[in-house]
Image: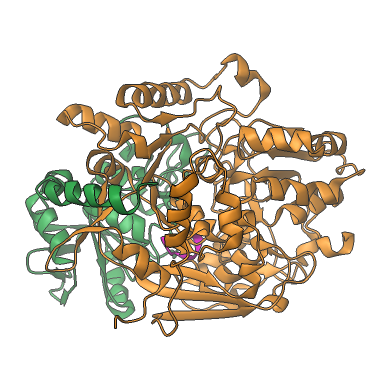
């Protein structure tokens, strides 16, 4: 996995609450057997009309947000389906960080595994960041994972919390399976014990 | 003396294989269910790294999301090339890695969350995962079951564990008795209406109370299935005699002395007196009415007797979301829900595609005809559910009423196969999500119970099923 570096980039405002993973990547794009190439279909039904023309009002179609690396979103972002195609599509588009008051659990976990940092902030901070994002391309937000801070274009700095293990994996770009294999003796021992205690499993 | 534990605490503790100082755990996974949409990249990852499936005997694969449900699939016709490739990939992967597999041609094929319990793969006290958010269904057995992403699918295939931190405990109690016409679907929708779609985020829900105890296993699966729609990764119901009766004799359930040993352990799987819950929600069973969704989030729930709400009834970010939902759904504030006309009925899905659901629909449809011009389909949750419905004479009732009688699959719940809504079409659906575009771009979905969907098929509009009892 790619390491998460400190980023300074454009933030796109998406204040809608309950943005679900069906919105992020509709089901017709789940038929792929690859992880790549989904960025063009990110938010497909909101982004294109029936004739596949871009809908100019949609935030990521606006000239100032086409290169966005951050999304500031309404509450409960990523709810619904467990499809990891959602973070794949976001990452492929170039999104590296999403900031909201809350995230759905499965989406939250899936993001870390694809080099995307989801940040939970209180409502009043999200309101400030949303206003900053609405300024457009000249307002560049800085996200520093090492320092655990988000800094607005006018220099307001806000700290955030993140699980230490997840932070470490994201900063180093670590592969979870490799980490788990370091504890394979514990898994072996558990299986031996369970063959005695719960042989029906 | 140890501190009192919740059911979730007990199952969690029984599966921790390794714990780091910061509380990050490796949780052992007893059953891994796999379908064609979220697994190809995971199997490919194993190939690229030269890894094997650690426990193929605990891994069960079945195609469900993409499969056509029309009868011509029996002859192997899958017109959509991408779907065909994905189904072929599952076939190849299942055989190459040696996992249990129910192909499309097998009568036991069906929706993964219906097949698992039906075949006795899902047992009390287990950990069950699948690359599908409705894995919560299996919590009905007192199993800790939740959806995972594809990276985690690969992790479980390779290590039979998941890296996890423990969630919080939430109790949802439904007291008393349900009134006639009120079902498990109404319970689970009413709970989401109460908590909101984010209310369960970070929690594992234990459903309890007399109304839950009184439910069959089918009903309990319906309740737990939609825990995820309330934001909770998992929903649980403590196993009891209803559970044990359902499990006994299933193909992969323990037998003989092992059954007795299993039963002894299963009987310890309940929340201890005095155990701590971080959050408690209580509803009175007798207050729950037949409900429908009116908007584009499962939390947009109202009793069928209500009217469409106004954005003014809400606060914060929900105001704009409601404006958008009313526009998308093509309905007006103040409109009676029973005045909303529908043109499509879909009965099926992992929420309501089991035999009891089909019986409930048949009871309403018996000897009647659906409204002229209505497109109505019943998609059983598995080949075995379909066979049983035919044996019980339910299929004849559906066909005579004017329903299409389909083969098993996820079908119009997420419309990855050809079963889709056209823009502007409006569907009474027994599935689990009413998101924008869920059943087809521009399609409009109202969620409800099988009996309510059957009633709407007869009248052509959202209908209070209690008037037909």
Chief secondary structure of the magenta portion? loop
Q: Is residue A31 magenta?
A: no
Q: Is residue A172 above or below residue A40?
A: below
Viewer-closest of B451 and B59: B59
Q: How many marks?
A: 0
Pick the quarter of the image with the C terminus of chain B.
bottom right
Pick the quarter of the image with the N terminus of chain B.
bottom left
Q: Is residue A101 above or below residue B60?
A: below
Residue depicted at 54% across the width and 46% down the height: B438
Residue depicted at 25% across the width and 69% down the height: A132
Q: Is residue B75 left or right of residue A102?
A: right
- Name the spot of residue B234 as percent of width and height, x first: 43, 61
Q: Is residue B424 visible?
A: no
- Name the spot of residue B290 as percent of width and height, x first: 73, 66
Residue depicted at 35% across the width and 61% down the height: A105
Q: Is residue A75 above or below residue B112?
A: below
Q: Is residue B109 visible?
A: yes
Where is residue B215, by image quadrant?
Answer: bottom right
Residue found farthest to the right: B367
The chain whose colour is green is A
- Name the spot of residue A147 as percent of width and height, x first: 7, 69
The chain whose colour is orange is B
């Amino acid at each position: 996995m790619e390491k998460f570096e400190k980023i300074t980039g454009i933030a796109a405002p998406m204040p809608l609450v309950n943005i679900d993973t069906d919105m992020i990547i509709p089901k017709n794009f789940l038929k792929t057997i690859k992880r790549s190439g989904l960025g063009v279909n990110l938010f497909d039904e909101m982004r294109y009309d029936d004739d596949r023309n871009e809908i100019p009002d949609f935030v990521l179609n606006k000239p100032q947000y086409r290169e966005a690396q951050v999304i500031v979103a309404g509450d409960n972002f990523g709810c619904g389906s467990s499809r990891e195609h959602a973070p794949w599509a976001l990452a492929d588009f170039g999104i590296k960080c999403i900031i909201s008051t809350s995230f759905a659990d499965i989406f939250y976990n899936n993001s870390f595994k694809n080099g995307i940092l989801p940040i939970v902030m209180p409502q009043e901070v999200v309101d400030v960041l949303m206003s900053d994002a609405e300024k457009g391309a000249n307002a560049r937000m800085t996200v520093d994972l090492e320092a655990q801070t988000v800094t607005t274009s006018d220099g307001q700095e806000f700290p955030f919390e993140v699980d230490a293990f997840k932070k470490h994996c994201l900063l180093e770009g670590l592969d979870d399976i490799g980490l788990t294999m370091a504890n394979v003796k514990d898994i072996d021992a558990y299986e031996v014990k369970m063959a005695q205690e719960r042989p029906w499993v | 003396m140890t501190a009192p534990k919740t059911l979730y605490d007990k199952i969690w503790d029984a599966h921790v294989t390794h714990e780091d100082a910061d509380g990050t755990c490796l949780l052992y996974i007893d059953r891994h269910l796999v379908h064609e949409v979220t697994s190809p990249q995971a199997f490919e990852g194993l190939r690229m790294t030269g890894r094997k499936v650690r426990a193929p005997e605990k891994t069960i694969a079945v195609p469900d999301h993409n499969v056509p449900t029309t009868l011509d699939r029996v002859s192997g016709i899958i017109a959509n090339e991408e779907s065909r490739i994905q189904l072929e990939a599952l076939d190849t992967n299942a055989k190459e890695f040696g996992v249990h597999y129910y192909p499309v041609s097998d009568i036991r094929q069906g929706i993964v969350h219906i097949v698992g319990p039906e075949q006795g793969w899902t047992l009390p006290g287990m950990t069950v995962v699948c690359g599908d958010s409705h894995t919560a269904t299996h919590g009905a057995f007192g199993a800790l079951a939740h959806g995972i992403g594809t990276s985690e699918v690969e992790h479980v295939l390779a290590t039979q564990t998941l890296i996890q931190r423990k969630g919080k405990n939430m109790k949802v109690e439904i007291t008393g008795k349900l009134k006639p016409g009120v079902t498990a679907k109404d319970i689970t929708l009413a709970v989401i209406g109460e908590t909101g779609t984010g209310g369960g985020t970070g929690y594992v829900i234990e459903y309890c109370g007399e109304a839950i105890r009184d439910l069959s296993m089918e009903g309990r699966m319906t309740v737990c299935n939609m825990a995820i729609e309330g934001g909770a990764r998992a929903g649980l119901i403590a196993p009891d005699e209803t559970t044990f009766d359902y499990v006994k004799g299933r193909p992969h359930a323990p037998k003989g002395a092992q059954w007795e040993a299993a039963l002894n352990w299963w009987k310890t799987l309940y929340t201890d007196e005095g155990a701590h819950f971080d959050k408690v929600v209580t509803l009175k069973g007798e207050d729950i009415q037949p409900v429908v969704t009116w908007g584009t989030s499962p939390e947009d729930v109202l009793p069928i007797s209500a009217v469409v709400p106004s954005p003014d009834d809400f606060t914060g970010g929900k105001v704009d979301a409601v404006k958008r939902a009313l526009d998308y759904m093509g309905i007006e504030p103040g409109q009676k829900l029973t005045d909303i006309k529908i043109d499509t009925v879909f009965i099926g899905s992992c929420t309501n595609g089991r035999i009891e659901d089909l019986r409930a629909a048949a009871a309403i449809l018996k000897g009647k005809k659906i409204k002229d011009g209505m497109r109505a389909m019943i998609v059983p949750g598995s080949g075995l559910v379909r066979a049983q419905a035919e044996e019980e004479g339910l299929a004849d009732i559906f066909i005579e009423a004017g329903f299409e009688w389909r083969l098993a699959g996820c079908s119009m719940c997420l419309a990855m196969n050809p079963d889709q809504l056209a823009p502007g079409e409006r569907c009474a659906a027994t599935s689990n999500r009413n998101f924008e575009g869920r059943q087809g771009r521009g399609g409009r979905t109202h969620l409800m119970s099988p009996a309510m969907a059957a009633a709407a098929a007869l009248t052509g509009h959202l209908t209070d099923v209690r008037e037909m009892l």
